[in-house]
Structures are given as structure tokens and as C-alpha cells.
Amino acid sequence: MSTLSLNIVTPNGSVYDREDVELVVLQTTAGEIGVMYGHIPTVAALKTGYVKINFDNGSEFIAVSEGFVEIRQHKLSIIVQTAEAAKDIDVERAQSAKTKAEEHINSEQDRGDVHRAERALERANNRLYVSSLK
Ligand code: ATP
């Protein structure tokens, strides 16, 4: 079976690199897609969610926040603001980010702050969810 190479890049640099990927499941803004070797070249926007990576002897979930994916026949490049493997997610930190964001949303703030807090809440909830998938 031909495999894909997968690279995940954030503003902090490359955080994931693998050459033997059989299937990647991605959450795009237009819905979930599965990508295998030979996929039609595409660029898509990713929402805050997970990337599921299947390889010969297992699979792994990565939490990502907003970005893009570039799909080529044998290579997939994911460019996102943040990415953490499920096993590396600090659950306490995500819980405290969630509480802080909820407090902001429930307090009297201007709309810009609320919007920022809503996105922080989305990231925190996503990290809590993905950490439960490991
Ligand atoms: P916090 O308030 O805890 O910083 P945040 O959502 O504002 O949460 P981000 O700006 O999305 O944090 O991420 C900043 C950096 O910290 C990124 O490198 C991200 O991968 C990492 N990070 C954030 N939360 C966690 C977590 N719960 N576990 C592991 N890494 C995290």
C-alpha cells in the first residue's frame, strides 16, 4: 500500500512529521474528509477540531486550531495556529482556560473580548475532547 507523508506546521515550527500515513481524517469548514494516497490535489480550511492519523500499527489524534491543509497526491501539509497530540494535552490547563473563557463570556465585556473568549472556549473544549480520544 502506498503511504502519505504528513507534516503539521504551526507558527512555532514543525510539530509533526511522518512518512508512513495510510489515512488522515480532517475536519474542514465544509465537513469531515478522509485522505489516502492519490487524493485529488486540494486546499481546504480547517476548523478547530482534530486530525486523526492512521498508520500501519496504530492511529493517533492531534488537536488543532484553525488553519489550512494542502493535499497533494503523496503529501499532506497542515498549517494551523496550534497543534497538540492527544497524549500531550495538559488537561488541567485546558480546564482552567475553559473556566477563564466562560467567566469572560458571562461578564460585561465589549463584543471583541467576548468573541476572543468564545474562540478560547472553543480551543479549550476541543483540547478536552481530543485528550479523551487518546
Ligand atoms: P491557555 O490560556 O492555556 O494558554 P490558549 O487556548 O490561549 O490556552 P493557545 O494560544 O491556543 O492557548 O496556545 C498557545 C500555546 O500553548 C500553543 O503552543 C499550544 O500548543 C499550547 N497549549 C495551549 N493549551 C495547551 C494544553 N492544554 N496542553 C498542551 N499545550 C497547550
Image (spheres, helix red, strand yellow):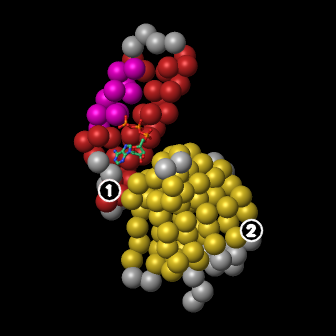
Residue density around tag 1, few if under 14, some if 14–19, many if 20 or more, within 10 Å = few
Ligand 1 is within 8 Å of the C-beta of the residue at disc 2: no
Q: Which mark is residue 41?
A: 2
Q: Distance between the residues labelled 2 and 1?
A: 31 Å
Between 7 and 69, the one lying in front of the other is 7
Residue 7 picture location, percent across and down: 55, 65
Q: Quadrant of residue 25?
A: bottom right
Q: Which of marks 2 and 1 is nearer the N terminus?
A: 2
Numbered range of the magenta stretch: 95-104
Vertical placement of residue 74 versus 51, above or below: below
Give the residue displayed 41% in from the left and 54% down from the top. Answer: 84
Q: Which residue lies furthest to the top in this view?
A: 108
Q: In which quarter of the image is residue 58?
A: bottom left
Q: Which residue lies furthest to the right in this view?
A: 41
Please state the quadrant of the image where ligand 1 appears.
top left
Residue type of the residue flagged with mark 1? Asp
Residue 123 picture location, percent across and down: 44, 41
Whether label 2 touches label 1, CB < 8 Å: no
Screen quadrant of the N terminus: bottom right
Mark 2 or 1: the one toward you? 1
Q: Name the residue under label 1.
A: 88
Asked whether the viewer can see residue 32, the reply is no
Label 2: which secondary element: loop
